Amino acid sequence: MRNIRIIENKFLLAGASVLALGALSNAASAGGFAIGEQSTVFMGSASAGVAAGGSIGSMYWNPAAASSLPGTNTESSYTLILPRSTSTVTGIESPLGSGPIPAGTPGASSGNVAIDAATGASYGSYQVSRDLWLGMALNSPFGLATKPDNPSYMGSILGVTTKLITMDANPTVAYKIAPGVTIGAGLQIMWAQGKLQFNEDGQGSIAQFLGTDWAFGGTAGIMIEPAKGTTIGLGYRSGMDLNLGGNFRQPLAIAPTIPAGSYNATGSLKLPDLVTASFRQEVTPQTRLLGTVEWTNWSRFQSLDLVSDGAGGKLSIPANWSNGWFFSLGGEYDYSPVITLRTGVAYELSPEDDATKRFTTIPDNNRVWLNFGASYKWSETITLDFAYSHIFVQDGAFERASPTLPVTLTGEQVSSADLISVGLRSQW
């Protein structure tokens, strides 16, 4: 009974920490609007080895990783995301005239559209028997918040504020079916809130949608140890559909479909599946080589559809995203019995691989990650983690049509990000 109370208390504390940070989890740090920093430990290796165990934070990518450690374990990670992104309009096409926008034109630049944010993730695992583990993960898998420093710039007709908050509870079970082979499965229970604003007439009339929804999905995975010191992991997180029920308010008519007013409305988008394959290879007793390949089914996100129930109108904002790919290689080195050092590099192929797919409010392109991390074993039961990442984002062009006006804008985006993460792990 005492062990059960300890588990319950730790899980409650973990849940409180994630819920407290969930309201701030508004900045995408991976391709599209995904949040890739789900563990300080693996952030240090640029996500290399994430599905192959080593810490219970691996559960996010592979539920079989609940079996990574014996006994009772908890892990919490807290990441500060410091993004920067600027969109500059360089051309316009409209019935009233088309052509390039000269460099330095007032109102052509958004200023920084990215918003600093924090995100958290917490995990707990409990070994029930020799072959059975129970786990719980609390995460924010997707998140985004952008707002230009200059909210009235030319690109505001494409979007002013875009915001998505998600909080996900993921109970899991892992079972060792044979020596060196463990399988796992879990349930995703997600709450989401979305907000969208755009300048509907180019003169400062702001239309806004705000809605919330619950979504459900699953996770599955397997970990194989074909030889001592070698672990291979494969994990899957299912896609989910969001139908955000809420309110759409617009000062002007979006003729001829939606008249001016305030209406009950539903905003629909499809979140992607995620497949992650990783390896963890012991090179020496103090050194481990890590690697990951990850596929994200962003092709599910073909459009953001907004249906106004009261007016019977529909507004569809095209996305047509491609699938995303992520590749990373990293390593761990035990500098001493209490200090472990990590580093890694990664390359990510963005789902926004064309100017017509690139949103001004979801700035993204192919990325290079450079990461460092360390752990300090404070005591026999407590370990402190630290990680830093710099993300180099390739400059990208955009070519987007206004949702409400017969206007298409072209331009350029420049982005980058820094991330700082701290974590705490405990074991009994």
Image (tube, rainbow, N blue to C red):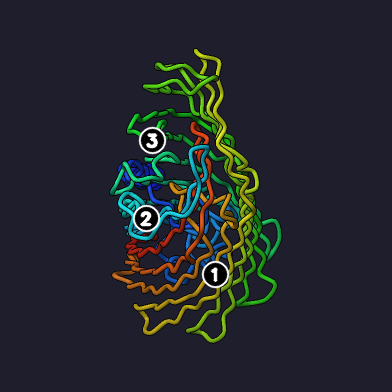
Q: Is residue 358 left or right of residue 262?
A: right
Q: Which residue sits at x=52%, y=37%?
A: 95
Which element type, helix, strand or loop, lies under badge 2?
strand
Which element type, helix, strand or loop, lies under badge 1?
strand
Q: Nearer the viewer, mark 1 or mark 3?
A: 3
Badge 3 is on which residue? 202
Q: Quadrant of the C terminus?
A: bottom left
Amino acid under disc 3: Gly
Amino acid under disc 1: Tyr
Q: Residue furthest front?
A: 97
Q: Residue furthest bottom?
A: 284
Q: Is residue 403 left or right of residue 4?
A: right
Badge 2 is on which residue? 76
Residue 67: quadrant of the picture: bottom right
Q: Which residue sits at x=70%, y=56%?
A: 177
Placement of 257 over or under 286, stated as above or below: above
Which element type, helix, strand or loop, lies under badge 3?
loop
Q: Nearer the viewer, residue 279 or 322?
A: 322
Q: CA distance from mark 2 to mark 1?
A: 26 Å
Amino acid under disc 2: Ser
Residue 257: quadrant of the picture: top right
Q: Earlier in the sequence, mark 2 or mark 1?
A: 2
Q: Which residue sits at x=48%, y=59%?
A: 56
Estimate how packed mark 3 is, as few (under 14), some (14 to 19) or many (20 or more) residues with alpha carbons within 10 Å. some
Badge 1 is on which residue? 347
- Residue 359 pos. (x, y %): 49, 48
Q: Nearer the viewer, mark 3 or mark 2?
A: 3
Q: Nearer the viewer, residue 11 or 332?
A: 332
Q: Earlier in the sequence, mark 1 or mark 3?
A: 3
Q: Which residue sits at x=47%, y=52%?
A: 91
Q: CA distance from mark 3 to mark 2?
A: 45 Å
Mark 3–mark 2 CB contact (< 8 Å): no
